[in-house]
Amino acid sequence: MQIPFHKTHTTQEEIDAVVATLESGWLTTGPKVVEFERAFKEYMGVKEAINLNSATAALHLALKAIGLKEGDEVIVPTNTFVATAEVVTYFNAKPILCDIEEDTHNIDVSKIEPLITPKTKAIIPVHFGGQPCDMDEIYSMVEGRRAKGEGKIFIIEDAAHALPSSYKGVKVGALPKTDITCFSFYATKTLSTGEGGMATTNNAEFAKSMRINRLHGIDRDAWDRYTSRGSWYYEIVDNGNKYNSTDINAALGLVQLKKQEMLREKRAAIAKRYLEAFANNSKITLPIVKEDRKTSWHLFVIKVANRDELIKELKGRGIGCSVHFIPVHKHPYYKERYGYRESDYPVANRVFEQSLSLPIYPDMSEEEVEYVIKNVVELLG
Ligand SMILES: Cc1ncc(COP(=O)(O)O)c(C=O)c1O
């Protein structure tokens, strides 16, 4: 049996939606992007949703919107995909890496405060695997400092894994004290348009900045210019980027957005089966979900002593696994440029050595799930 680490959920509905867009005569940012943004903001219950071509673009423009400048600092967990830290470097600002919690693999909020300096401009919590971080603790730390006159620290959520997730009954993407939330629609994500991203915010100024900067700093979208509503004239009002998404991607996104709860249920059922099957296995540390939050189950990460060997053996039996993540402080570029020290991240180091992500996607059959379980148990002996 061959079980890839991930397979995208694509049905005739997605195919029909893309074909209809191909036949429409307009492929790039246009009516479908507008419709996708509207559907996304209604789904979230927020004022603004800005569709971009990746979460990396969303994070970059979010930092631009809050006014990040050279020399500023942004606190991010070391256990993340490099994009979270990389976007900070675009500004010649410094990513300040924070260690993580042993059980959730999320940023350890108790370790954030000592990292805060007068240069700290923002914190980017990453909802690892879809489980929301301890957001209330982050908000109260930031508000406490503000009350003492210590300057504003913005909160930008990296929600690349967190659709759909919720924290204390509120959807990630709609937490009112967060400035901007960024989602990824990359190939392996819970909503996939191949590549893509979305930023949500209730702040009209941030939204305006992101909309302008996603298309070269033009004061309005190309689509406007080419329809009867628009004219040929435009002005560049900022030095922006080429980060707009396309109607083809948005057509896919619209179909997948409607299915998010159903697709989550399917992943949750797989997670439940893994949790049951491995519950009494002393060689496996299982993921935990805190009581007051709901995870998207984007990832199912177990920890074992012989991680590398297990991945190799599972591969030999046709099962694809992955590792989330190689901590940012271990990557040569980051280590050399910023001088991060291994000893500052003991938990992330330990978690990294032991973690492996098992396949978990809606179209996995029961037989495939059982095959994964059987082989993991057999190989661990
Ligand atoms: C935690 C995290 N943040 C950001 C990103 C970047 O997303 P994108 O590929 O859409 O730019 C990823 C992608 O894997 C991710 O896992």
Image (spheres, rainbow, N blue to C red):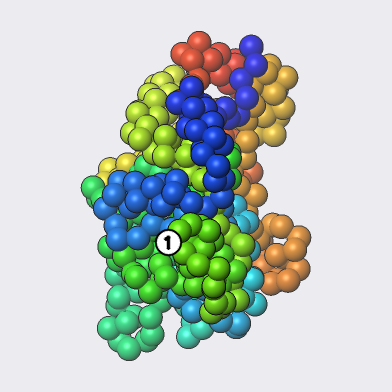
Secondary structure type for disc 1: loop
Q: Nearer the viewer, residue 236 or 259?
A: 236
Is residue 138 visible from the viewing direction of this image? no
Which residue type carries mark 1?
Answer: Arg
Residue 364, placed above or below residue 159: above
Label 1: few (<14), some (14–19) or many (≥20) C-alpha neighbours in 10 Å: few
Q: Is 378 or 185 nearer to us in this picture?
A: 185
Residue drawn at 65 percent across, 61 percent down = 329
Measured from the top left, where is residue 322 in percent x and y?
Answer: 63, 36
Q: How many marks?
A: 1
Instruction: Find residue 152 and report its horizontal and vertical position in percent.
Output: 38, 80
Question: In the image, 124: left or right of 91?
Answer: left
Give the residue at mark 1. Answer: 229
Q: Position of residue 221 (x, y in %)?
A: 50, 63
Q: Residue at x 51, y 45 (%)?
A: 247
* Quadrant containing the C terminus in the rendered view: top right
Task: Work out whether residue 7 can be spotted.
Answer: yes
Q: Is residue 28 above or below residue 177?
A: above
Q: Is residue 109 left or right of residue 90?
A: left
Say above or below: 260 vs 128: above
Q: Quadrant of the N terminus?
A: top right
